[in-house]
Amino acid sequence: AQKVTQAQTEISVVEKEDVTLDCVYETRDTTYYLFWYKQPPSGELVFLIRRNSFDEQNEISGRYSWNFQKSTSSFNFTITASQVVDSAVYFCALSERRAGNNRKLIWGLGTSLAVNP
Amino acid sequence: KAGVTQTPRYLIKTRGQQVTLSCSPISGHRSVSWYQQTPGQGLQFLFEYFSETQRNKGNFPGRFSGRQFSNSRSEMNVSTLELGDSALYLCASSSGQGSYYDEQFFGPGTRLTVL
């Protein structure tokens, strides 16, 4: 069963619009981490944020913000005043702890965001 | 600091051939992971190495293998290529041991096309 769901396959917005990318996850673990990565057309995934399961504080970094809600198992990502350079595929990932602090990393299928001028 | 580098960037092979892809992690990083990315399957974990030891392995057939050298550089090999092996192969490095809380830094990938 898929454990990380990014229900929006593709989103298209006009520059300066706000856009929210959804991420819903499933886990039985109490200790885990959630990540967001950006993959621009060049192909290289870029780390955006890491959040552990005990920290539900929202985070803001410039035009980017993240809303983590354990009650709904969601870790949503909002871009405010989107720009063309935000066009990319965005991945949400769940990292579960295994023996020896090894990770079991489960990736969502990604949301392709197109920001049009 | 230089990022993760992968060579070659593009590769075209025919069915039945074998291929070796190379990855140089960020200086000081000792953990290297490999992923296969395809439009239909998304990102699939292949294997992870730390200090020349394989720590973790995904569900891929034995045709896929890897290794890590003492300088942390890593190679992956695919033998007897099949059409379905066409994909973007991504390498990622971590500063830690590849623990569940470590973020990963990705290279640009090697685009493999099997004809």
Image (cartoon, coloured by chain):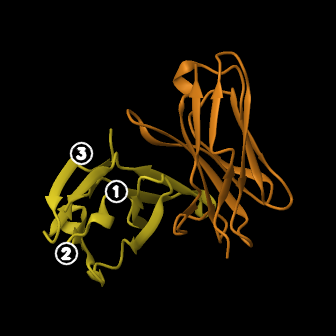
Name of the residue lying farthest toward the top: B16
The C terminus of chain A sits in image quarter: bottom left
* Disc 3 + disc 2, Cβ < 8 Å: no
Q: Which residue occupies the foreground of this view, B35 or A96?
A: B35
Q: Which residue is mark 2?
A: A80
* Image mark for residue A29: none
User: In which quarter of the view is residue A33 placed?
Assistant: bottom left
Which color was chain A given? yellow
Q: Which residue is mark 3?
A: A9
* Residue A16 visible to the viewer: yes
In the image, what residue type sits under mark 1? Ala
Q: Nearer the viewer, mark 3 or mark 1?
A: 1
Q: Secondary structure at mark 2?
A: loop
Instruction: Name the residue nearer the viewer: B69 or A113.
Output: A113
Amino acid type indicated by mark 3: Thr
Query: Would you call the spot at circle 1 few (<14 residues within 10 Å), some (14-19), or many (20 or more)?
Result: many
Residue indicated by mark 1 = A88
**In the image, is A95 to the left or to the right of B49?**
left
Of label 3 and label 1, which has the lower sequence position? 3
Q: Using the numbered discs, state the Cα–Cα distance from disc 1 to disc 2 in whole angstroms.
A: 15 Å
- Tell me the colour chain B is drawn in: orange
Q: CA distance from mark 3 to mark 1?
A: 12 Å
Residue reaching furthest right? B70
Residue at x 24% of width, y 55% of height: A114
Please state, as top left, top right, bottom left or bottom right, where the N terminus of chain A lies in the image.
Answer: top left
